[in-house]
Amino acid sequence: MKKLLAFVIVLGAAGFLFYRFVLTSATERSCERLATLCGQKSAADGCVRTMTELGKSNKEAASKFESCVADAKSCAAGAGCMVGAGIGAAGQVLDEFLKGIGEAVKK
C-alpha cells in the first residue's frame, strides 16, 4: 500500500511538472508569475493575449520580457518588464518606419 501511495505521489508530481514546463508556453508562465507577484491572478489572461501579440511582431522583445519577469522580485519590477518590452517593440517599429521613409525619399 505504501509503495502504491508513493507511486501515485511521484506520478502526480511528474504530471504536474510535465504540464507546467512542457505544455505551458513561456509567455503563459511569465504572465502567471507576473500575476502572482501582483496578486491579481485574473490579469494573467490579458497579459498572455498582449504578450502573444507582441511575440508575433517582435520575438526579441517578448523573449526579454520572459527572462526579465523570471528575475523580477516584486510587482513593480514585473510591471517594468512589461512596459520595457512594449517600449522596446515600439522603438523597433519606429526604427523600421523611419528606414521606410528614408528609402522612399531616396527613390
Image (cartoon, rainbow, N blue to C red):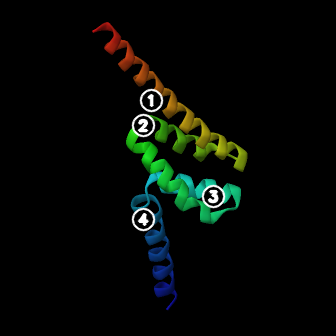
C-beta proximity under 8 Å, tags 3 and 4:
no
Q: Which secondary structure lies at badge 1? A: helix
Estimate the x, y position of residue 17 in percent, counting from the top left.
47, 65
Q: Which residue is mark 2?
A: 58
Query: What amino acid type is highlighted by mark number 1?
Result: Val
Residue 39 located left or right of residue 43:
right
Q: Which residue is mark 1?
A: 93
Sequence-wise, the earlier of marks 1 and 3 is 3
Estimate the x, y position of residue 72 in percent, counting from the top left.
65, 45
Q: Which secondary structure lies at badge 3? A: helix
Residue 25 located left or right of residue 88:
left
Residue 55 seen in this snapshot = yes
Q: Is residue 72 above or below residue 2?
A: above
C-beta proximity under 8 Å, tags 4 and 2:
no
Q: Which residue is mark 4?
A: 18
x 40%, y 59%: residue: 22
Estimate the x, y position of residue 68 in percent, counting from the top left.
58, 40
Q: Which secondary structure lies at badge 2? A: loop
Give the number of the mark in front: 1 or 3: 1
C-beta proximity under 8 Å, tags 1 and 2:
yes
Between 101 and 8, the residue placed more toward the observer is: 101
Q: Residue furthest bottom?
A: 1
Sequence-wise, the earlier of marks 3 and 4 is 4
Query: What amino acid type is highlighted by mark number 3?
Result: Ala
For residue 35, the mark is 3
Query: What amino acid type is highlighted by mark number 2?
Result: Asn
